[in-house]
Amino acid sequence: MKRDLDHMSRQSFDLLVIGGGITGACLARDAVMRGLKVALVEKADFGSATTAATSKLIHGGLRYLKNLEFGLVRESLRERRILERIAPHHVYPIPFLIPTYRKGGNRRPMIKAAMVLYDILSFDKSFGLEKDKRIPPHRSFSPKEVLEKEPGLASEGLTGGYLYYDCQNFNPERLCLDVILSASLGGAAVANYAEVVDLVRTRRKVTGARVRDVFTQKEYVINAAVTANVSGPWADRILGLCKGVQDRKVRRSKGIHIITERLTDTYALVFQTAGGRHFFIIPWRGYSLSGTTDTEFEGDPDHVAVTAKDLEDFVAEINQAYPRANLTAKSVRYCYAGLRPIVDQEVETLYEASRKYEIYDHKEDEDIEGFVTVIGGKYTTSRSLAEKVVTLILKKLGRPFIPSSTDKIPVHGGSTGDMSRYIERECAADSHHLGPSCLEHLIRTYGSAYTHLLKFLERDPHGRNRLCEAHEDIQAQISYAVSQEMCITLSDFLLRRTGLGTVGDPGSECVRRCAEILGSKLGWQPERIEREIEHFYEQIRVPS
């Protein structure tokens, strides 16, 4: 995967995708697999915004049943199963425990009805899946059984609980990257740190975009028959570049998550705040991930961040719902904020807003050809959304309909079959003598594509050296990230090519080692290395 904006500017594409989050990634992959010539540009790094700021789940959206959004839940549950199959190294079943109480929103009859309906809507939840991906039906527990499983839950008014399964996304940033890699290997031209600064028009037709290289500030024109605006929280900003297009307000919902020491052992816990919003406490990478909040954000989407007030309020909500947590702001190892783009709706709070998506063909709406915008959606349904958009684009281009096969063909690294057996088999072979813990870590990070990484061990005598004492990541991953994964900054590597920085500071020695090795690959001067280290620490800083 090579970044070459100059080469992209000297070609003509069928489709230009603006946005390198999970929706743009899925759109590029689907379009390439259906025979289109595709370019994709992203203003920052792939998967670095909304895609990275999730609860690390692939889920059906149990709470959407309250709003009677049966279609959205059914689509999400179907896509959950598909993602388990095509990305087995990223998507795993995880048990959720919902305690029910005499008072409040988590009342037993209501949760029971939701559980039954959720099982009905996911009737095919295990069809065609390997044994380690199959999801069992829900179970109910007595108050005594609930407290045996999670003794830290409040016992007063406890009426029991329900166990159900959804899926955890081990590394949403890397799943997005694997979809991008799939598109690239299929022939798509892709570039990160390439910001769209204008749309190119010929009368009432959009013919591409003017793109600025974030590092050199040089601008390029990329030509395409159709341009797709899938820039998430920035969708209305891109629309603003196209005169004559009706303004469509994107409401931005800010959600924060925090990482703390582990608060639960086995289950992800589902709680309801005093204000009626649900949140999770989820086991993740040896810690607990708690989230999310849901507040309207009206500032510049480039500058969303967790504030000290955000932390204070959310920590208070967690402690009220789960007193055993006993958190303070100092308990937070790492935190992050993201924006969910939501189709403008007349709702009192954004928590009540639907996570549905809208696809706008500007030919139909404003008689402007060659331009499509997507607003809304969620990570779980990004593949099916992309399928619909590509079907529309084929029609706009006058091409014969070709069915999508993205639900059947694994993404990059997804050819493992049963993950448990694959890991066991590869660890037994271990031809490079890395040891079972390191090998398992690499397989869960790269899937079947970890074998491509092993080739770099043969070229680098230090490739098997660990980057950090407390982590299994090795030096060869840096060479691989630069050569094969368009890794350009230290934060790219620590936050998105690996998970080293996603649970907080991996240690100054580790950070500097990564910066110096990465700098040697990319030709950084000492001043650049220091700037990269400083920028990384700015990104992971916990406000106080």
Image (cartoon, rainbow, N blue to C red):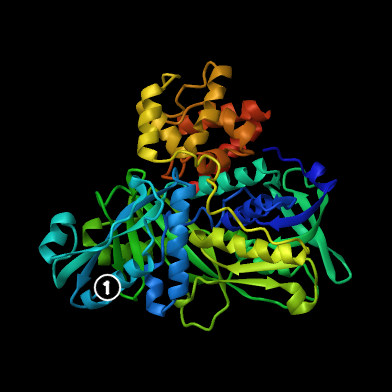
101 displayed left or right of 366: left
159 displayed left or right of 358: left
Q: Residue furthest left?
A: 144
Q: Position of residue 120 (x, y in %)?
A: 34, 69
Residue at x-position 18% and y-position 58%: 152
Q: Residue furthest right?
A: 203
| Residue beneath disc 1 | 111
Q: Residue furthest top?
A: 461
Seen in the picture, residue 461 relative to 371 is either above or below; the reply is above
Q: Position of residue 273 (x, y in %)?
A: 31, 71
Residue at x-position 26% and y-position 66%: 321
172 displayed left or right of 32: left
Q: Position of residue 240 (x, y in %)?
A: 74, 70
Name the kind of residue labelled 1 in the image. Answer: Ile
Count of numbered badges drawn on the protein: 1
Q: Nearer the viewer, residue 284 or 88?
A: 88
Seen in the picture, residue 350 relative to 122 is either above or below; the reply is below
Seen in the picture, residue 364 relative to 428 is either above or below; the reply is below
* Residue 333 seen by the camera: yes
Q: Residues within 10 Å of mark 1 (few under 14, many from 20)?
A: some
Q: Position of residue 255 (x, y in %)?
A: 46, 63
Residue at x-position 58% and y-position 77%: 344
Which quarter of the figure has residue 320? Answer: bottom left
Q: Quadrant of the N terminus?
A: top right
Q: Nearer the viewer, residue 444 or 300?
A: 444
* Residue 301 seen by the camera: no
Q: Quadrant of the C terminus?
A: bottom left
Seen in the picture, residue 479 relative to 23 is either above or below; the reply is above
Q: Secondary structure at mark 1?
A: helix
Residue at x-position 45% and y-position 31%: 473
